[in-house]
Amino acid sequence: MKQRQRTTILITFTVIAILIVIGTYTNYNGSEFSPKTQIIDMAGRNVSVSTNPGSVASITFSATLQIYMLAPDKLLGWNSELAPEQKRYIPAKYQNLPVVGGGKQDANYESFLTLNPDVIFTGHAESDGSIDKIQQKFGEVPVVDVEDDNNINNIIPSIKFTGDVLGEQKKADELITFYNNVSSQVNTTVSKIPENEKKRVYYARDPTGLQTDPDGGSHTKLIQMCGGVNVVNVPLTKGSAQVSMEQVLEWNPDVIIASDPTFYQKVFSDPVWQNVKAVKDKQVYLAPNSPFNWFEGPPGVNSIIGIPWTAKVLYPDRFKDMDIKNLTKYFYSNFYHYDLSDQEVSDMLSSSGLKEF
């Protein structure tokens, strides 16, 4: 009898101990247990997150795009309403995800919380000191910070980190491999271009063409990465720079890259712009913008496909062997989850101004 009692007590304590361990390391969510793990985010904070989160959101667009590329079925919502042109190359089941807003200062935190996210992402919140305030607003929902997700020159660590948190390491490795391949090919070629032969480039952001970004800014990194010289030498600010037509005429760029279709459509017939070398030589190009801008806006993972495109824009003769058509189809299929037809990719590239692809 005493032996049986001791056995019963031992079993009871064992069960209790197991339940304590489960309670410590897992959260119960419906009928499934979600194991937790401790990670160090890119702000250097210890954060307890689900080992394989099923639902995530981000308050910054650059991080949202990383989530969509790596794990679209885990993304809870977009930061803003998608335009019809953006939806064109996004599968229907992702087009109408809830719009949860964004921005660190004015995000609607309640709208995020109603979706019951397992993890909230935020971008570059360590560098501006906002990470702790963001965590406080989300309460017990873990917040992880991604740094350099808007830095095309050093974007690999952010992709790897996001893949690790999402449990999508293989997909992250695929994106990193694509980035390494195109950037290596471009760098190998442009590193051989003498300084006096490099194309001088102007980036036009708005319908007037006079809103731009100076050299050294995050929004024009593709120019330098692809062997060009940004002619805009005004002081670097947080926002875009407003310049005058007189300045553009003085800079007289060889190539203009535009992000606004209105400017692109009128620039060749605008008498003021006719005096700019790039316009005279028909060297004005429109960055593809569907579903997301290839050049910047944000300057993040969406700019990866912009690397071979910008290289082709600046130096078509040096990149004749770069198969931008198949690179685009691969990128869209694997990371935008949309299979482009041959006609769609041809239309996209020709509409950007590329003559050969």
Image (cartoon, rainbow, N blue to C red):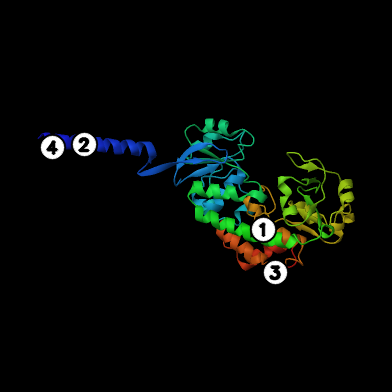
Residue of label 4: 4
Which of discs 2 and 3 lies nearer the camera? The answer is: 2
Disc 2, SS: helix
The three-letter amino acid code for the residue at tag 4 is Arg
> Mark 4 touching mark 1, by CB under 8 A?
no
Residue 22 location, quadrant: top left
Q: Which circle's residue, 4 or 1, is located before the other in the chain?
A: 4
**Left/right of residue 328 with respect to residue 34 in the rendered view:** right
What whole-number distance in Å separates the C-alpha atoms at marks 2 and 4? 10 Å
- Badge 1: few (under 14), some or many (20 or more) residues near its Cα, within 10 Å? many
Judge the density around disc 3: few (<14), some (14-19), many (≥20) Cα neighbours within 10 Å: few
Distance from label 4 to label 1 (Cα)? 70 Å
Of callouts 2 and 3, the N-terminal one: 2
Mark 1 and mark 3: Cα distance apart in space = 15 Å
Eye-nearest disc, 2 or 1: 2
Q: Which residue is mark 3?
A: 321
Give the residue type that dot 2 points to: Leu
The answer to whether any part of residue 96 appears in the image is no
Q: For the point 12% across and 36% down, which residue is it? A: 3
Q: Residue 133: which numbered mark, if any?
A: none
Please name the residue that numbered disc 1 is placed on: 183
Q: Picture coordinates of residue 29 (x, y %)?
A: 38, 41
